[in-house]
Each structure stands twice: as structure tokens, then as C-alpha cells.
Amino acid sequence: MSEAASGVRVIGLWPSPYVIRVLIALKLKGVEYEFVEEVVGRKSELLLKSNPVHKKIPVLLHHGKPISESLVIVQYIDEVWSSSGAPAILPADPYTRALHRFWAQYIDDKLPPAIRTLRATDAAAGDKEQAAGQMSAALQLLEEAFVKLSQGKDYFGGDSVGYLDIALVSHVGWVKAVEKMAGVSLLDRAKVPNLVAWADRLCAHPAVADAIPDADKFVEFSVKYGSFSKPINSGAK
């Protein structure tokens, strides 16, 4: 293991969108890391020691120092490896940066609850219909935000993958999975064409492709672990 990898460790589980964010940010910056995978349904001593407040994934360990909460970790990575040669993750303009943070919080407020309902085997049909409607409405607002923030470029961050791109794409694997599980259409090309094209483009990006497996793998995980997998989308961010 290289010195760089030994200095950076990520505690998490691969299906967690919040863990996915951290991995994408590290890959964008070209940072080597060790992935310390938790066991579903358990909390390791390392996790409990590293995040004694929330006791949740992800945790970034940088030379033994723990940082928790995915969006905080992404900002930390951007600041620490600012001289890596990779583009900045957060926008330089304070107002644009504030907008990205606002929409990132909106994403985490709206998408995970709907995803949990749509993948629950014991949720009523009416609840699933309501959840699908709420997510569709949220995605339509994000479609409008993309048009404004991207200014005709490929990403929310413009020419390069940015903070809001990372915040949203981390949920795409589960969105596609619940489309299959609940028989709903969410990333609908007729309703959110720019967002669908953005998701296709971003999921093919070298820093993202390995971090987000095919939707079928998320479906298999949900079927296999059932209630144990619920904290994946409901834990600390």
C-alpha cells in the first residue's frame, strides 16, 4: 500500500449514496485511499470510535483523524487537495457556492425518504404513489436548477464535475433501482431530458463509473438484506 493510500481511509458500505460521494470526490482529486467496508447490520469498533456522535457511515480517516458527514467530507477533500491539479469541486463564486449547497441539502431532504418508501416491501400502494410523485416533482425542480446552473455546459459545475453533481449522482443508483422495484418512471426523458442526459454523461465519467454499480446490484442488495439495508439511506449524511 502506498503512503497516500495508508494516509486516507474510508469507512462505509458500497450501496450508501453518502459513501459514494466520498469515493467520487477522492477519485476526482486523484487521491489513493483504502476502503474499509462495514458489515451490514453491524457497527465496527473502528466506526464507533471514529464517529461516536452519529455512529454512522461514511467516515474519512486522514492520517488517523476522522471527518464525518458526506457533504462535509467532500468539502474537506476539495480544500485539502486543492493543489492536486484537478478542478475545484466547490464553485469559486460565493453566491454560486451557496446555491450548490442549498440544492445539495434539498436533494438530501427530498430523495432519500421517497427512495425508502419505494423500496419498502411493506409500504402501501398509496404511499408508494405519493413517494413517486414527490420524487418526480423534486427531479423536475432539479431539472430547472440544472439548466440555470450549468449554463449550457455538461455539469452543474459547468465544464467539470462539481459539488452538486456529486451530491445528486450519488443517489442515481438507488433511483434507477426503485424504478425497477416499484415499477415507476422517475428519470423520465420526456419530463427531465436534461437531467437524464446529465445522469448518463456523469455515470460514464471515470471518477463515477466504478463508484455506482448497475441498478440490478442495488436491487439485489435490497432484496438480500431487507430491513438491514434501510439505514443505508436513512443514516447520517
Image (tube, rainbow, N blue to C red):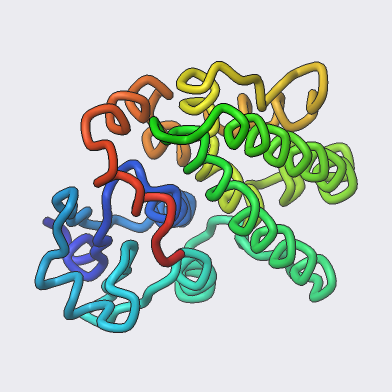
Horizontal side, residue 155 vs residue 219: left or right: right
- Answer yes or no: is residue 83 visible: no
- Say if 207 sits above or below 189 in the image: below
Say left or right for 117 vs 8: right
**Depicted 118 relative to depicted 49: above or below:** above
- Would residue 161 be visible to someone looking at this image? yes
Please tell me in which quadrant of the rendered image residue 210 appears. top left
Give the image quarter of residue 86.
bottom right
Residue 136: x percent and y percent? Answer: 73, 34
Q: Where is residue 32 in the image (x, y as percent from the top left)?
A: 29, 55
Compared to residue 58, the image places residue 144 above or below, namely: above
Locate residue 69, reporting x and y percent: 44, 70
The residue lying toward the viewer, choosing from 55 and 130, is 130
Residue 16, position as x, y percentages in the image: 37, 48
Q: Which residue is drawn at 77% across and 44% down?
A: 142
In the image, residue 3 sits, relative to residue 225, either above or below, namely: below
Q: Which of 115 and 164 is in front in this view?
A: 115
Residue lying at 65% horizontally and 20% vertically, measured from the top left: 185
Q: Residue at x 10, y 72 (%)?
A: 45
